[in-house]
Image (cartoon, helix red, strand yellow):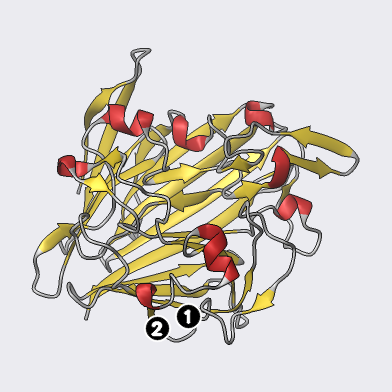
Amino acid sequence: MITKSLFGKLEDGREVYRYRLVNKAGIEMGLIDYGAIMTHLITPDRDGKMGDIVLGYDQLADYVRDTAHLGAIVGRYANRIAGGRFSIGRQRFTLNKNEGNNHLHGGPGGFHKVLWQGEIQKNPRGESVRFSYHSPDGEEGYPGNLILRVTFTLSDLNELHIEYSGETDRTTILNPTHHSYYNLSGNFATSIEGHQIQINADRFTPVNNELIPTGAIEEVSGTPMDFRIPRTIGELIDVNYSQLRSAGGYDHNWVINRNGRKIRHAASVYDPNSGRFLELFTNQPGIQFYAGNFLNGSLVGKGGIRYRRRSGICLETQHFPDSPNQANFPPVILKPGETYRQYTIYAFSVR
């Protein structure tokens, strides 16, 4: 079942709508066409009690003011680009900077701050909404007119499918992702440090003090970055390890093991208290695991709850940060006549 209702109005009078999707198991997801944002995701715990597991806000105005990208589609380029600069061939492009000297998540006016066009669609997998956005040539400094479509489908198998497709009229770069913060406890006043996480990655991309990749790709073995076997997030997050000191905890890109499969298992998260279990599958080469280290209580969310440090985690399927400036990273170039495609699945269950 899908229902559509007015969520609010922007300052210029444009209307923002919320789409409420419910599957046969009673899982409920809310989406708005501002930022293509997921506002809520309600799933059962092991006792069948329903609870919201994504951080967000009650009012549109809070999403407009938001600085943490809660629940949004971000881009054109998710994550960081060093110095806000990159080249395509001999041509140099300068992007808007919004994190010190660097460009983050598409810039201050990125996809998370625009009004998308929402459309309810029929989909054999389940309830589905497609968001479309035309990003004009030069927006935030990116070349080319870009059309991006993002389709959210909530299946009766308790899976969230997110499909991306995009075309450009001029060679550009593209690397969007979904930026929800998950707390599987259903209680946003609690930390996610007790969650257990497993990441299907033998390697990760280390960063400097500005969280820009150094260009190296290193083994996780023997480091606190090794999540090949499930480990509690809080077990090693505060140890004296240079990569964790730089980010205040986990905020890094892991190189997903390919195992010969296009869409493969990337990560899983388990909350022992609620029993909720989340599995993640994708065709992307990397995943950013961010433990909410920079949440500091300044954001007041649903029900007046302040989002404090490590009250949610992000699992962002992506190409690697700063790939346009790193020749040894997988390329992110999109040319006219080509179609960008990304496919990510979040599967929900209990244990």
Crowd band around label 1 with a 10 angstrom C-alpha radius: few (<14), some (14–19), many (20+): many
Quadrant of image for the C terminus: bottom left
Residue at image position (53%, 71%) is: 263
Quadrant for residue 102, please give it. top right
Can residue 254 be seen by looking at this rendering? no
Observer-nearest residue: 108 or 24?
108
Q: Is residue 200 left or right of residue 322?
A: left
User: Left of 179 or right of it: where is 246?
Assistant: right
Residue occupied by mark 2? 230
Give the class, few, some or many, for how many residues have Cα within 10 Å of label 2's Cα (few <14, many ≥20).
some
Of residues 33 and 312, the one nearer the viewer is 312
Numbered badge on residue 227: 1
Label 1 near label 2: C-beta < 8 Å? yes
Camera-nearest residue between 266 and 196: 196
**Nearer the observer, 215 or 266:** 215
In the picture, measured across the screen, residue 343 lies left or right of residue 60, that is right
Residue 167: x percent and y percent?
Answer: 64, 41
Outermost residue, front side: 240
